[in-house]
Image (cartoon, helix red, strand yellow):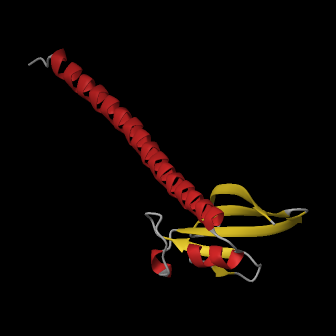
């Protein structure tokens, strides 16, 4: 009996098809992984920008550093900065287990001839403290 060559060709074609399918799946998994990472980074940046902008608005509305700290719900650190913790949605939290972002505010007051210039530098980091997500500087002038 003779074996047909069609059977061998079928197996070769099937093998090539499986290899192509595996290569396609590998590429798709890499693309989906990159998309998930980009989505997470965008979500973190959006929350960080919102936190910093809200802090800047509270700074503009406050009359003093003490008022600002009270509005922000922040605690003064050993370095003299204000620190506040935020959850994943960007809401203020006191629960350290829910902490996802940390806002650090460095405030400065510079006397001028007819008042004072108040400046604030806001840094939003991930809860691990190593990754700076967003920084914002703002100023306001208080006439005297």
Rendering coords of residue 126 (x, y %) = 57, 65
Question: What's the residue at 49%, 72% (across, down)?
Answer: 92
- Image quarter where the C terminus lies is bottom right
Compared to residue 84, the image places residue 32 above or below, namely above
Q: Total label count?
A: 0
**Side of 69 where 120 appears, left or right:** right
The quarter of the image holding the N terminus is top left
67 on left or right of 47:
right
Image quarter for residue 31?
top left
In this rendering, position of residue 110 left or right of residue 102: right
Looking at the image, is 41 positioned above or below residue 115? above
Q: Is residue 73 left or right of residue 112?
A: left
Q: Residue at x 71, y 56 (%)?
A: 137
Which residue is at a point 22% across and 19% down the rendered structure image?
9
Q: Where is residue 124 in the image (x, y as percent from the top left)?
A: 62, 62
Seen from this angle, which residue lies furthest left? 1
- Give residue 120's quadrant in the image: bottom right
Of the pair 130 and 76, the residue shown nearer to us: 76
Where is residue 21? Give x, y as percent.
Answer: 30, 32
Q: Nearer the viewer, residue 122 or 41?
A: 122
Q: Nearer the viewer, residue 134 or 122?
A: 122
Residue 65: percent from the left, percent from the top?
Answer: 70, 75
């Amino acid at each position: 009996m003779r074996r047909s060559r069609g059977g061998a060709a079928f197996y070769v074609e099937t093998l090539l098809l499986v290899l192509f399918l595996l290569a396609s799946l590998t590429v798709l998994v890499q693309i989906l992984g990159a998309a998930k990472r980009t989505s997470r980074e965008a979500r973190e940046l959006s929350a960080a920008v919102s936190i910093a902008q809200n802090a800047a608005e509270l700074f503009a509305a406050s009359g003093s550093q003490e008022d600002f700290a009270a509005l922000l719900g922040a605690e003064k650190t050993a370095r003299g900065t204000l620190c506040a913790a935020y959850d994943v949605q960007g809401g203020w939290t006191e629960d350290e287990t829910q902490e996802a972002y940390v806002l650090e505010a460095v405030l400065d007051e510079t006397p001028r001839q007819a008042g004072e210039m108040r400046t604030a530098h806001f840094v939003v980091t991930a809860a691990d403290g190593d990754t700076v997500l967003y920084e914002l500087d703002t100023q306001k002038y208080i006439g005297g």
